[in-house]
Image (cartoon, grey):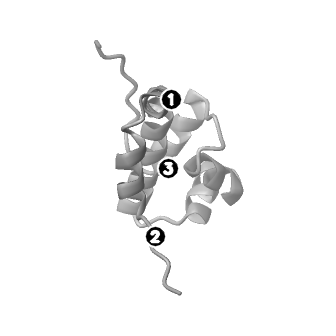
Amino acid sequence: MKRNHLDFTTWKKEALKNPHFKAEYDKQQPEFAVIEAVIKARMKKSVTQEELAEKVGTKQSVISRLETGRGNPSVAFLKKLAEALNTRLEIRFTAL
């Protein structure tokens, strides 16, 4: 029996048509942006979670929790990540 699976992009596009889902998704956008930025910077530098954790002075599991959205990093921790990845941390407020 063949099972049809939706890829995440297709599922997300359909889910965002629901106004309640979209409202909750939009509320989480800052968290998603942090996660995406950390993962992209780490991948660009070809650094594993374990290597990044060592540079920051923490455990790999802390990096994993951050990248899966189960952490709430402080600005101080984000600064450490930026330094370890040889990048600059920028935090902005933008007009709606």
Expressed as whole percent of the image width and height from the top left, the position of residue 45 reads 38, 61
Q: Residue at x 29, y 13 (%)?
A: 96
Question: Are there few (<14), some (14-19), or many (20+) residues within 10 Å of tag 3?
Answer: some
55 over 92 or under it: above or below: below
Q: Residue at x 39, y 39 (%)?
A: 16
Q: Amino acid at mark 2?
A: His
- Secondary structure, mark 1, is helix
Return the residue at label 3.
84
Task: Measure the alpha-carbon separation of dots 3 and 1.
Answer: 32 Å
Between circles 3 and 2, the one closer to the viewer is 2
- Secondary structure, mark 3, is helix
* Residue that extends furthest to the front in the rendered view of this protein: 1
Q: Residue at x 55, y 40 (%)?
A: 80
Q: Amino acid at mark 3?
A: Ala
Return the residue at label 2.
5
Task: Measure the alpha-carbon separation of dots 3 and 2.
Answer: 38 Å
Q: Amino acid at mark 1?
A: Glu
- Secondary structure, mark 2, is loop
Earlier in the chain: of badge 3 and badge 1, it is 1
Task: Measure the alpha-carbon separation of dots 2 and 1.
Answer: 24 Å
76 over 93 or under it: above or below: below
The reply to whether residue 65 is visible in this rendering is: yes
Return the residue at label 1.
24
Expressed as whole percent of the image width and height from the top left, the position of residue 84 reads 50, 49
Relative to 58, is 67 on the left or the right? Answer: left
Question: Are there few (<14), some (14-19), or many (20+) residues within 10 Å of tag 1?
Answer: few
In contact (CB < 8 Å): disc 3 and disc 1: no
Expressed as whole percent of the image width and height from the top left, the position of residue 55 reads 58, 55
Between circles 2 and 1, the one closer to the viewer is 2
Earlier in the chain: of badge 3 and badge 2, it is 2
